[in-house]
Amino acid sequence: MKQMACQEWVNRDAEVVATCQHLSYFPLVVESAQGDIVTDKDGNRFIDFLTSASSLNLGSCHPEIMSAVQEQFQKCTQYTPAYTYNEATITYAENLVSVYPGGVKAKIAFGNCGSDANDCAVKFARAYTGRKKIITFLNSYHGNTYGSCSMTACTPRMREKMGPFLPEIYHFPYFGINLPDEQVERDCLQAIENAFSMYLSPEEVAAVVIEPIQGDGGILPAHPIFIRKLYDLCQKYHILFISEEVQQGFYRTGKFFAIEHYGVIPDGIIMGKSIGGGFPLGAFMARADIMDSLPAPAHLFTLGGNQVSCAAGNALFTILQRRAFQEQLARTIKLLWEEAGQLQRKHPDVVGFVRGIGMSMGIGIVKKTDTGEYRADPEGTYKILYRAYENHLLIINVGANVLRVQPPLNISDDHLRKGFAILDQAMTDFEKGDIPDAVLAGKKGW
C-alpha cells in the first residue's frame, strides 16, 4: 500500500501541531470521504468502521445533509445565537425535545461539542438542586474541557500535569454486561452506599452522570440491573439521573438514545458528535424546570447552536425518523451481529468476546496463556487493526484490547461484509505470525 504522500503530511504535522492532538494508529491523511468510504492522500480507499469517532452516523457527505447545508450557506454561514434568534436553531430544538424519552416536557441548551455539553449538565444540575457533588464512573470518558476531563476516568494521560481539576467529582465502579447477574445484584451499589454512609452525603449529590454504554472505555453496555438500581437510588435521594449519549445517541444503538434500552426516563441527556450531522455541535437537554434554573449568560457560546450545524442536524433528524431508514437499520444491525458471530466462531482463540448494542460493537482480542487462561492482548489488538488498515479497513481500538466497530448506520451490506472479511484475514495473518512486531512502533492510540 502506498503511504508516501500521507507520511509527508504526517511529518509536516509533527512540526506544527501539538503532540496531544492525535491518538494515532497509522499514517492516514484524509483527502476525501463519501458515504462509507474514506480516501487518503495516496489514493487508498478504506471501508469506514470508525465513522469519524461516531460523529458521522449517516456517513460522510450525505446528499440530503449537504443540500441542507448548501441552502443554509446561501442565507448566512452563521450569526451568533447568543444575541439573536434563527429558524434553524429553533427548529432543531423543537425536533430534539420532541423525542425526549417518556414524552417529558424538555428544553435544550446548545454548545459546540460533547465536552462542553457535559460541562453544561454539571452547571444545570448544581443550579437546579442547590447541591455541588457529581457522581461519575471509573473507565468513563466525558470529554476534554476542564469540567468534562474532571469527570473522565479512563486514562491518566488526561490528568497528568494538568491538575487541579473541577472539585466535588466522585468516581465509582461501573457494572457492565460482562459481569454475572448475581454479582451485579449484590455489589453494584455497595461502593456508593458505603460512601453515602461514611463521607458523601446523598443530600449533597446533585447528579449521577452515566454512559449507558461506555464508549472509549471499551464499548461496554451497563448491566440492566445496575441501571435500574442506580436509577432507583437517584429517585430515593432526589439526585438527577443524567444519560451521557455523546457517542451512543442518534440511533447508534438502534434507538434514538441508548438509555431507551433500559426502561428508565432520565432527568437530562448529554449529546454531541453526530448531533450536528457531521458539523460541530453539542447540547444538553433536560426537563424544562431544570433548564429554566439558570439565567443568561450562564451557558452560551458565540457559535453554539449555529445555523449551519443546526441545518445539518435538522436534515439528519428527518432521515433518522423515516420508517424506511429504521427498517433498513434493523436489517443492518442483524447483519453486523451475524458477521461478528461468524468471526468469533472462526477465531475462538483470538476473539474473546463480542459485545455492544445495535451498531455500537466491541470485539475483544485475547491470547491464551500457558495455563490455558485467556487474557487481554493489547499488542495483538494493534497488529490486527494495523493489518486491517493495510488491507483498506479503517478501524481502531478502545480500552486495551477492544476493536471499536461503529460503521455508518447506513453502510452498504457489501461494504459491511467486506470489512469483516478484512478483519477475518487480519486475524488469520496474526494467528500465523505474519504480522511483524515492527508495526508496533506506530502504536500511539488509546
Image (cartoon, helix red, strand yellow):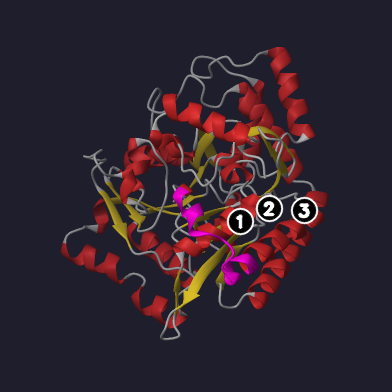
Asked if marks 2 and 1 touch (Cβ < 8 Å), the reply is yes
Amino acid, disc 2 = Asn
Q: Is residue 436 magenta?
A: yes
Asked if marks 3 and 1 touch (Cβ < 8 Å), the reply is no
Q: Nearer the viewer, residue 82 or 14?
A: 14
Magenta segment: 428-441
Residue 226's place in the image compared with 132, above or below, is below
Q: Position of residue 418 (x, y in %)?
A: 76, 57
Residue at 62% from the left image edge and 19% from the top image edge? 86
Crowding around mark 1 (Cα neighbors within 10 Å: few <14, some 14 to 19, many 20+) is many
Residue 294's place in the image compared with 99, above or below, is above
Tell me the residue that label 2 is attached to. 391
Q: Nearer the viewer, mark 3 or mark 2?
A: 2
Amino acid, disc 3 = His
Tell me how far mark 2 sits from mark 1, CA to CA. 6 Å
Image quarter in which the N terminus is found: top right
Give the mark, 3 or 1, whose residue is nearer the N terminus: 1
| Disc number for residue 415 | 3
Tell me the residue that label 1 is attached to. 387
Q: Nearer the viewer, residue 264 or 3?
A: 3
